[in-house]
Each structure stands twice: as structure tokens, then as C-alpha cells.
Amino acid sequence: MCDRARYSVLTPDTLHREVHLWLLDLELAYSLCDMHDRMLSGDELEKVSRFASSELSYRYRATRVLLRYLLSKYLRTSPKEIQFTYGANGKPHLRPDHSLEFNVSHSGNRAAVAITANSPVGVDLEEIRSIPEASQISAQCFSPEEVRQLAGMATLQQISAFMWCWSRKEALLKAMGCGLSEPMNVYHVGARLPLEPWEISVTECDRAGSTWQVQDIPYSPACSMAVAYRGAPKELLVRHPTLSHILTL
Ligand SMILES: CC(C)(COP(=O)(O)OP(=O)(O)OC[C@H]1O[C@@H](n2cnc3c(N)ncnc32)[C@H](O)[C@@H]1OP(=O)(O)O)[C@@H](O)C(=O)NCCC(=O)NCCS
């Protein structure tokens, strides 16, 4: 999956037809936090101080530091120079208005960063686990067809399929920027286990008629992960770098 030959080609020139998905091991990055906090902005540092647990605080800091490193390589600037602005529901974007789009997801000690150009992008990464309220959640958030698909599965398969369906939906809503403020059951993304890349046409949102791609990323049996973006299919490049790779890109 990892495409080392292309690590050095972090140019926005081909990004309009590619999605770069960076899979990050946050544990390795925790050591960087204290040293690199000075690259964070005032509002990021303020958010760091508001986390209830140090674990969540470290996760946020480590992800932001790595995100800044990654974006700085594409933009050929220093990580500290990167400026973020936030959409109505909190989606971070680059400031000033930039064709480069990104989205972040974290789960446990892993994070995923999706980067593309000229189309909004969303990513969701979840550790596959049994969710006690799964049936209430699927009744509320899944389409009738998705609920039927889940009901036809054996219990173990259901646990996994629930998480995959959730990741596809969350990636789609994050691409749109609305996050979970939008009703989820109007988007049918399927509850089956991962197959080929596929596309859906969203008909029930204020961007009616737009085509969005929702793609499964089956990179580990322990995780469900999906990336979504607007427009025609793009080439997906998955990268799983070591920390030193990121720092020396
Ligand atoms: C975005 C949202 C789906 C994140 O869910 P999550 O499973 O906890 O977190 P993930 O790890 O997948 O993603 C978090 C990242 O998504 C990004 N993000 C935040 N808001 C976003 C939005 N509206 N759309 C897309 N991405 C968003 C951020 O980069 C965030 O990481 P950061 O805080 O380290 O910068 C959720 O917080 C949400 O729906 N927010 C918007 C609406 C809202 O505030 N609702 C309140 C509850 S209904």
C-alpha cells in the first residue's frame, strides 16, 4: 500500500486527480508534542488546555503537529505558517482560501489525514468494536436498506459491518462539512463489508445532485476507514510513513 517512491512528490499539481491518505501512528509522535507546541496557534493551544484527559490532549496535539508538517510539505512553507479557518460546523480548512483540501480522523493511537485538491474531502477511521447501543444507532442513523442488510448478518459480521457503514457515512458527512449535525439516515452508503470503490449520488442535501465518492480503505482488520470526496473518481494513494519519514519529507 505504501508508495515510498512518491513520498517526495508532495506537489499540489496532481492532487486534483488524486487523494493522498496518510496513516499516522500517533504514539510515535507524542514525544514530539512538547518540543513542537510552539508551532501551534493560540486557538490550538487553548483547545489543548481544554481537554478533560491528557490522553485526548496529546492525541490532538500530536495530530495537529503531524498535520502541520504534512501540509507544510505540500505548500512549501513552514508548519508554523499554516493558518486554519473553520466552517460553520467546525471543519478546518486552509486559510487563505486554497484549492488544497484536507480532513483528519483519529481513533485510539492512530490518525488518518486525507489530502486532495479542488474537492471537499472527508475521512473517518474507527477501531472495530462492539457498540452496546448499535441497534438504537442504526435505527436512527442508517437507511432502511442498511438496517435490513445488518439484520441479515451473523453477530460477528454485524459488529464489523456496523462500523464500516458508520465510517462511510461519517466520511461523507465530514466531506460535506456538516459532520454529525446532519441527519444520517438519508444517505445510503450500504452496510456490507468492504468491496470495490464505488460512488453514490446524494439527492437529499442542499448540494442536491452532486456526486460524491465514498471509498472503503480496508488497511487493517481492526479498523474501518472510509474516505469521501465530491466529483469524479480520483486515484487514491495510501501512505503509512514512519515518524522520521514525515519529518524529513
Ligand atoms: C466532525 C465530527 C463528525 C467528528 O467526529 P469524531 O468521530 O469525534 O472525530 P474524528 O476523529 O473522526 O474527526 C475529528 C476531526 O474532524 C475535523 N472536523 C471537525 N469538525 C468537522 C466537520 N464539521 N466536518 C468535517 N470535519 C470536521 C477536525 O479536524 C477534527 O479533528 P481535530 O479536532 O483534531 O482537528 C463531529 O465532531 C461533528 O459532527 N461535529 C460537527 C457538528 C457538531 O458539532 N455536532 C455536535 C453534536 S451533534
Image: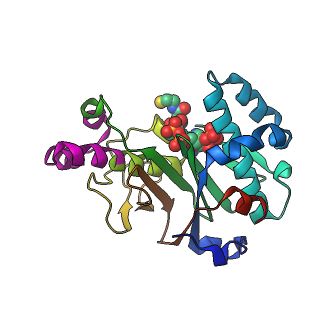
Q: Nearer the viewer, residue 3 or 139?
A: 3
Q: Residue furthest left?
A: 152
Q: Residue at x 51, y 52 (%)?
A: 123
For the residue pair 85 and 47, the one nearer the viewer reads as 47
Residue ranking furthest to the bottom:
5
Q: What predominant SS class does the magenta segment belong to?
A: helix
**Image coords of residue 70 (percent x, y):** 72, 58
The vertical placement of 208 against 138, above or below, is below
Residue range (magenta): 137-163
**Would residue 113 be counted in the magenta stretch?**
no
Q: Residue at x 66, y 47 (%)?
A: 28
Q: Nearer the viewer, residue 102 or 53?
A: 53
Q: Is residue 100 above or below residue 183?
A: below
Image region (quadrant) for ligand 1: top right
Q: In the rendered image of this protein, does residue 240 appear above or below residue 157? A: below
Give coordinates of residue 13: x percent, y percent: 70, 75
